[in-house]
Image (tube, grey):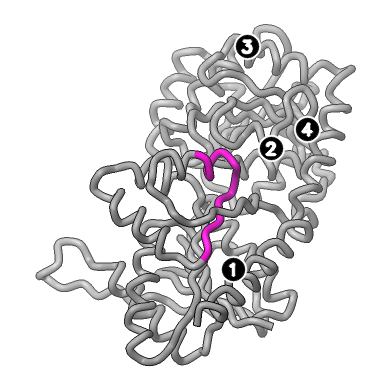
Amino acid sequence: MMKIGIVCYPTFGGSGVVATELGKGLAKLGHEVHFITYKQPMRLDFFSENLFYHEVDIKSYPLFEFAPYELALASKMVSVIKYEGLDLLHVHYAIPHASSAYLAKQILKTHGISIPVVTTLHGTDITLVGKDPSYEPVVTFSINQSDGVTAVSEDLKKETYEYFDIQQEIEVIPNFIDLERFKKQRKDHFKFAICPNGEKLLVHTSNFRKVKRVEDVIQVFYNIRKQIPAKLLLVGDGPERDRMERLCRTLGTCEDIRFLGKLEAVEEVLSVADLFVMPSEKESFGLAALEAMACEVPVLSSNAGGIPELNLHGVTGFVCEVGDVEDMTEKALTILDESRLPGFKERALERAKEFDIDQVLPKYVSYYERTLEKMLRIQ
C-alpha cells in the first residue's frame, strides 16, 4: 500500500470533487491519503483511518498585497512529505499546484528525499488560465517537470499539446463518479411539488460563468415551454446569476424556473429530472453531465471539448453546435417525447456505469505504480 499526498482546490468545482472522491476511493483500498490544501475539501465529509487533512496556513502581512499561497503550499508539501513519509504526490490543476510541487521537490532534494509528482490537468488550467501569457511559461515548465501527467479527456490532451511545448507523455484517465451515491432515488413527492401537473423537468447545474452559456438553457426552455408543459431547475451560483434572473423576467418564464443556488446533494434534484442541459462553450469533460446520466437522465449538450466523448449523440442524448438554440430545442423535444424518453434514460445509465469509480480507480493506481517504478529506474 502507498502513502499518497493529494493537492486540490477544496471547492464544488470538478477538479476538487474528482480529487476528493479519488482520495476517498484510494483510502477504501487501504492506501494512506493525505490532503494538502487551504480548506477541508467539500466532499471530505466522513472519518476514515486512512484519510488525513493538512491545512495550508496562509499568513497575512502588511507588506503583501496578495498573500503568497504558492510558497505556503510548497512549505506545507515539504513538511507533510518529510514527516509523513509520502511515496507520491498527486496535484490536481496545474496552477499553482504543479509549480509549488516542483519547488517542494527541489527543497526536499537538499534533505536527501526524492518523491515523484503526478499532475492531473482538468481543463481551465490549460484552456483558459494557462494560455494567458502571464502564466504560460510556468505552466509549461511545471508540466514538463512532473514525473507523470494525466488529462481527463482526449480533447484536453490534444489541446495541451497544441498550445504548450510539452515533452511529457500525457495519459488520459477520465473523470468518474461513485455510482452508489447517484443511484436512482425515488423522490416522487419532490417531483410532484415541482411539477404538480406532470410537466417535464429540465435541470442545469454550473458555476454560472459566461462560458457555461446559461442563457442558452433559458432560451431552450422558453422554446420548449411553447410546445409542452415544462419546468426548469437551475442549480449553482456565480457572476451570471443576476443577468439570468433578469432574462427570465424579460421572457416571462419566472413562474416555471427555480434558482436553487449551490447544493451539495445534487443527486436529489437530478433523480427527478427528465433532461439535463449543458450548452457550455468550453468543457474539458463534463462531470455534471456524468452525474446526471448516473441518475438516469439523458443529456442535451454542446459539442465543446470532451463532452462528445461522454455524451453519445443519439444514444445518451444529443450533441449540438455551441449556441445553436433552435437545434437544441428540436433535440430536447425529441428526447422528451414519451415514446423515446425511457430508452434515453436507460442508455444514459448504462453509459454512466462505464465511468464508475470501480472502473477508473485501478487506472490511477496502475499509473502511480508505473510512475514510482520509472523514478526508481532513473535513480
SS at badge 4: helix
Q: Is 139 covered by the magenta stretch? A: no
* Depth check, front residue: 154 or 353: 154
* Separation of residues labelled 1 and 2 (CA atoms): 26 Å
- Judge whether 65 appears above or below 33 on screen: above
How far apart, in angstroms, are the residues tagged by discs 2 and 3?
20 Å
Mark toward the viewer: 2 or 3: 2
The residue singled out by tag 4 in the image is 192
User: Which numbered disc flags the more N-terminal residue, 1 or 2?
Assistant: 1
Residue 318 position within the rendered picture, expressed as x and y whole percent measured from the top left: 70, 23
How far is the residue under mark 3 from the one under mark 1? 40 Å
Which span of residues is magenta-colored?
A: 148-158
- Picture residue at 28% right of the left edge, 52% below the top: 137
Looking at the rendering, which quadrant does residue 114 occupy?
bottom left
Q: CA distance from mark 2 to mark 4?
A: 30 Å
| Residue on which the image places disc 3 | 327
